Amino acid sequence: MKQEDINLLKQLGLTTYEAKTYITLSSLIHATADEISDKSDIPRSKIYDVLKRLNSKDYIKIESGRPLTYHVNPPINVLKREKEKFIRRINKTGENLNTLYEKKISEVEAPIWRISGLDNIIDKELEIIRRSKKTINMKIGFLLQNEGSKLVYELLLKSENVKINIMVSPYCRISYEEFNISKLFNQKNVNVYTTDIPYVKMLISDSKEMMHIYSKFSKENGEILPNTAIGIWNQYEEIANNYNERFENQLKKIANNNVKQ
């Protein structure tokens, strides 16, 4: 009997005795209480209550007779059911905590944070995108390692209900290779405008919060120097709205130029 199996069943809501009993009966398929007690080292004084609880949780079935016979419900069915229940609980808790987080974060004083570390920067970008309800406006002059596909995935999840506009540079360099930014973000329901963007990145969500990302670059080949990357996350709505207005005005100019051409 592996301790990791016991621990997993405990995470799904069983007690130690219940976990040991279920694992034991899985190896016996069906057995009497005495047989299960002997095999699992659970005292006879406890085994009947444990088996009753497992029956009520639909882990086992009880066959009438003298003595009673206990049958294990197939682990593949039981674990699939309990996994689905566990995931539903996690999702519900996640929704509750996220609602609490979003409600309180706007009340934090001086809502400007400096973020360092590539993973932290990318995670914050994805978090902002997930929070958006109406609009996402972005300028992308470069991409961090492993960032592009993650951004596209989250943007596509939002694209049915959120208006997405992205200004991009045609190319950037990642891992010493030229990378086509415009092609990557040219997806359904994502409006992509190719233009000259400096080596900066900006994300604005719902005109309420925004993030700037900066980095130093190699003078030799334009390769990003990842250890120098920083993000500035800003939740001052007035500032975010001002940047959003400037973005929209620039977008109109690009659109007008495209029409003239």
Image (spheres, rainbow, N blue to C red):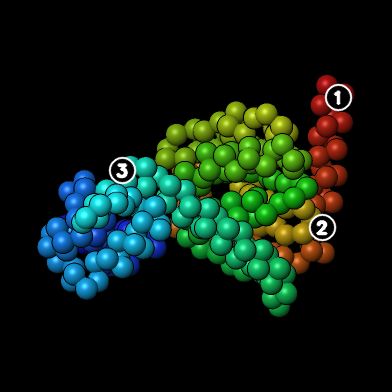
> Seen from this angle, which residue lies furthest top?
261
Query: Residue at left 83%, top 21%?
Result: 261
CB within 8 Å, label 1 to label 3: no
**Residue identifier under label 3:** 74
**Residue identifier under label 1:** 259
Residue 241, numbered label = 2
Q: Choose the circle earlier in sequence order: 3 or 2.
A: 3
Q: Is residue 213 visible?
A: no
Mark 1 falls on what kind of element? helix
**Residue 160 located left or right of residue 92:** right
- The CA distance from mark 2 to mark 1 is 27 Å
Closer-to-camera residue (221/130): 130
Q: Amino acid at mark 1?
A: Val
Whether 261 is drawn above or below 161: the answer is above
**Residue 202: percent from the left, percent from the top?**
67, 51
Query: Residue at left 29%, top 51%?
Result: 64
Q: Choose the circle earlier in sequence order: 2 or 1.
A: 2
Around disc 3, counting alpha carbons within 10 Å, would you say few (fewer than 14), some (14 to 19), or many (20 or more)?
few
Q: Quadrant of the N terminus?
A: bottom left
Q: Amino acid at mark 3?
A: Pro
Q: Choose the circle earlier in sequence order: 1 or 3.
A: 3
Residue 47, numbered label = none
Query: Residue at left 64%, top 30%?
Result: 187
